[in-house]
Image (spheres, helix red, strand yellow):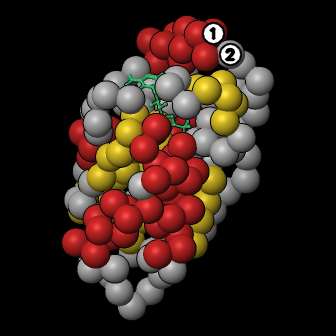
């Protein structure tokens, strides 16, 4: 694990109407990403799209499933220079068993091969789902390791668990 330089936390998170936690102002994964950023002293890049703004849970589920079926790569805002980071945390909600398609847009644009990549998810039962496999597939030459998952409805009381996990990684 790289302890000399800063790590980068890359994440996507959907605020608004959500499963189990109701209509939330801050997404579950963002809360975890913020814990990591603070506890590991990391930098942060949020994958932002406005495609899903204001959508109710069920229509969002239908849209997400369709995007996944078609392998769509929705655009996101901004960009990040990853060259100075040896370690990149990658986090998002599990949508239909893996990360949301917009994260695959990031994977297609940003090369993390050669780096240590640490996947994390928030979910409501799938755990890590296929996320680790899909990150490995996107970056066959990355060291994909140290993964972590937590229920979305547990994140608000979950800081100690995140801290415990980060300690196992040497942070
Ligand atoms: C479109 C959609 C699909 C989802 N699919 C799954 C799933 O396959 N497995 C699962 O455990 N949870 C699923 N969930 C629940 C989310 O993973 C969970 O609520 C997560 O914490 C949301 O994180 P966020 O607030 O950062 O977006 C889904 C939620 C949405 C909105």
Residue drawn at point x = 51 percent, y = 50 percent: 156
From this viewpoint, is residue 37 visible?
yes
Question: Disc 1 vs disc 2: Cβ atoms closer than 8 Å?
Answer: yes
Quarter of the image with the N terminus is bottom left
Position of residue 31 in the picture relative to residue 78 (left or right) = left
Residue 48, given in percent of the width and then of the height, sits at 68, 44
Q: Quarter of the image holding residue 69?
A: top left
Q: Quarter of the image holding residue 87?
A: bottom left
Residue 142, given in percent of the width and then of the height, sits at 28, 60
Ligand 1 near label 1 (Cβ, under 8 Å)? no
Return the mark for residue 56.
2
Ligand 1 near label 2 (Cβ, under 8 Å)? no
Query: Dot 1: within a 10 Å radius of its alpha carbon, few (fewer than 14), some, or many (20 or more) residues?
Result: few
Q: What's the CA distance linking mark 1 and mark 2?
A: 6 Å
Residue drawn at point x = 42 percent, y = 44 percent: 154
Q: Which of 81 and 29 lies nearest the eye of the viewer?
A: 29
Q: Which residue is mark 1?
A: 59
Position of residue 58 in the picture relative to residue 70 (left or right) = right
Quarter of the image with the C terminus is bottom left
Q: Label 1: state its secondary structure.
A: helix
Residue 89, given in percent of the width and then of the height, sits at 42, 61
The relative height of residue 43 versus residue 155 in the rendered view (above or below) is: below
The relative height of residue 112 versus residue 18 in the rendered view (above or below) is: below
Query: Dot 2: within a 10 Å radius of its alpha carbon, few (fewer than 14), some, or many (20 or more) residues?
Result: some
Position of residue 52 in the picture relative to residue 35 (left or right) = right
């Amino acid at each position: 694990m790289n302890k000399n330089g800063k790590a980068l936390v890359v994440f996507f998170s959907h605020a608004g109407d959500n499963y189990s936690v109701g209509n939330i102002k801050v997404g579950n994964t963002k809360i975890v990403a913020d814990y990591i950023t603070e506890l590991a002293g990391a930098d942060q890049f949020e994958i932002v799209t406005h495609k899903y703004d204001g959508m109710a849970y069920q229509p969002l589920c239908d849209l997400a499933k369709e995007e996944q079926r078609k392998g769509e790569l929705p655009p996101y805002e901004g960009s990040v220079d990853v060259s100075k980071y040896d370690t990149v945390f990658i986090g998002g909600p599990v949508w239909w068993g893996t990360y949301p398609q917009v994260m695959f847009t990031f994977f297609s644009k940003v090369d993390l091969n050669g780096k240590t990549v640490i996947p994390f998810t928030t979910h409501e039962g799938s755990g890590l789902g296929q996320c680790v496999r899909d990150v490995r597939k996107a970056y066959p030459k990355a060291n994909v390791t140290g993964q972590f998952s937590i229920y979305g409805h547990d994140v608000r009381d979950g800081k100690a668990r995140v801290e415990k996990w980060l300690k196992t990684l040497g942070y």
